[in-house]
Image: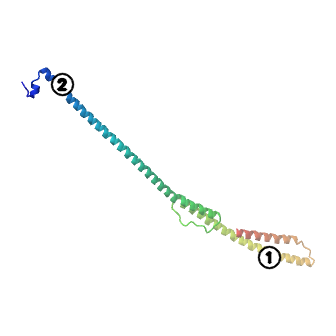
Amino acid sequence: TTLGLPPDLAALGDSALRDRVRSLGEALSAGTLRVIANDADTEARLATDRAVQTRESAWKVTVWAIALGALVTLAASAWLYRTIAVPLGRARRYAEEVAAGRADAGLPRHTADEIGALTRAVEAMKEALAGRVAVMREMAGVVIFQAEGVGVAARHALGVQEHADANGAGADLEDMHEVVRRAETLRDLAEQMLQA
């Protein structure tokens, strides 16, 4: 039976037909392998192109990440400087002014953080010291007043004693002069306290 082979194949014998089919199979197989090899080459080129694109994308992402990191670092540094370093500098200058004895030193703005608490504590200390200085000045004024009173009384007593000596009473005037000197020394120390 014939299967409807083309006339050139139908004229061939069994052995020649087998050889012809084998040669056609090999040709078909070689063509298929060539197609597969070409497809593999194409896929390899596409994979290489994708790898290059991925590398370029990764480089761009890395550059942007570094730039963004630098920008965030710069912004954080500026924020830290403005919120910590500047108020600490103001607080330090304020504390130095208070330590130098400037009773009128003041810090115009208090923050709600630890720096504000520190400046409020220094301000409370300044007010307490100012109160103590006021009490010391008041006490020095009282000492001056009392020293002047003692001096006046001592000079009066010295005048009486000198008058008595002039009339022949003959008392020791050195003790009275010592009282006057001590009263004057006490008055001078009190005035120095007031000036300090």
- Location of residue 177 (image quadrant): bottom right
Q: Position of residue 43 (x, y in %)?
A: 29, 38
In terms of secondary structure, where does tag 2 sit?
A: helix
Image location (x, y in percent) of residue 91: 57, 61
Q: Amino acid at mark 2?
A: Arg
Image depth: mark 2 or mark 1 in front: 2
Label 1 neighbour load within 10 Å: few <14, some 14-19, many 20+: some
Find the residue positioned furthest to the right.
Answer: 168
Say above or below: 76 vs 136. Answer: above
- Which residue position is annotated with label 2? 22
The residue where tag 1 is placed is 152
Residue 105 vertical position relative to residue 58 in the rendered view, above or below: below
Q: Is residue 190 left or right of residue 124?
A: right
Q: Position of residue 75 (x, y in %)?
A: 47, 56
Measured as percent of width and height from the top left, residue 81 is found at 52, 58
The quarter of the picture where residue 93 lies is bottom right
